[in-house]
Amino acid sequence: MSDSAQPKATAAALAMAYSLRWKRRRLLWRSFRKRRQLSVVTDRTRQITPGAILCFSTMRNEAVRLPFWLDHHRALGVDHFLIVDNDSDDGTREYLSDQPDVSLWRTPASYRLSRFGVDWLTWLQMRHGHDHWCLTLDADEILIYPFHDTRPLPALTEWLDRKQIRSFGALMLDMYPKGPVSAAPYGAGDDPRIALPWFDGGNYMIQKQNRLENLWIQGGPRARAFFANEPRRAPTMGKVPLVKWRRGYAYVSSTHSALPRGLNHVYDEAGGEWTSGVLLHTKFLHMIIQRSAEEKERQEHFASSGLYVGYYDSLRGDPDLWCDGSTRYLGWRQLEAMGLMSRGTWL
């Protein structure tokens, strides 16, 4: 870099840092204001002990998924769940309020206008997540990572603490059945990996976003089935779901990116591998057909309504996402061998 270019680069970096610092403050202030939209259903946060691992989620009408979702993440080592129910009418709220390790809030407010639930969760993380490892998930996401079947989350977070690593990345991996999605019957308590045993193993694009320095990953069955003509508009699959939370942190876009942007550094730019996991995405259970009709009507999940109307119409058509390139799920060692997760230096 020339002598004249260096001051310009330094000035640009300072301007970017200033802009992001104010963005984070605006997000925190926004979440503080949205706290009034939440009403307590059951508050058991006094049970939270120092060092407890917490899980945060916003959900609506997920009663069928909840028994397995809760049990799986309890088995991993989550100590307490802090959940916002967005006006469910299928028994979700009643089921959660009976769980001894769940604190529950309710809101009828707009999911879309709360940044798709992130504002509500940020407020709860500000109040209860400080100095805790916090896992932020949707009800259709199941976290797995190397050795998760023998090494629970406290083993992983203790290692991350020793390495002074404050965040943990994961690829969201869409799971689907062979045949139409209606061919994946599912009952409460079932393991969704049985109903959805297939995934795309290799059609992923990845790039680093300069502003937030997060990884932007696209591909999988949604990209090829619903966004084939506009693959760059397909959903992004990279997430940072596990963070050693501090009161001034904030997610920017779901858990795809966070501020300060150092939290997004869950990769090795030098070409090595950092320890990472996978979020098994169980969206494509048979309920998706009815849910898609409802979500098209509500328009609460639309980031771009013109783009997603066709997406929901396609889902209502009971699509078959399986193709000759589909891979049957066998376990975390298979995903590691395929490069979809990594043990990194965690041996």
Image: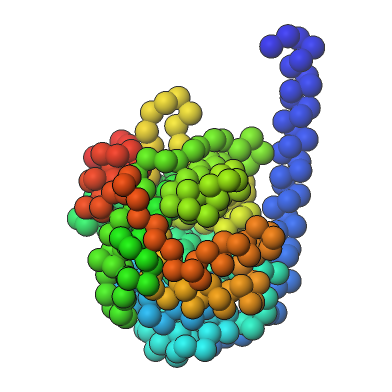
Q: 301 or 168, which lies in front?
A: 301
Q: 183 or 273, which lies in front?
A: 183
* x 30%, y 60%: residue: 178
* x 45%, y 37%: residue: 267
Query: Number of numbered discs present?
Result: 0
Task: Quadrant for residue 247, please give it.
Answer: bottom right
Seen from this angle, which residue lies furthest top? 2
Task: Quadrant for residue 231, please give it.
Answer: top right
* x 38%, y 80%: residue: 64
Rendered location of residue 136, percent (x, y): 48, 62
Rendered location of residue 3, percent (x, y): 76, 9
On the rendered structure, is 100 left or right of 36?
left
Q: Is residue 279 visible?
A: no
Q: Is residue 291 above or below residue 252?
A: below
Q: 277 or 102, which lies in front?
A: 277
Rendered location of residue 329, percent (x, y): 26, 53
Q: Is residue 299 visible?
A: yes
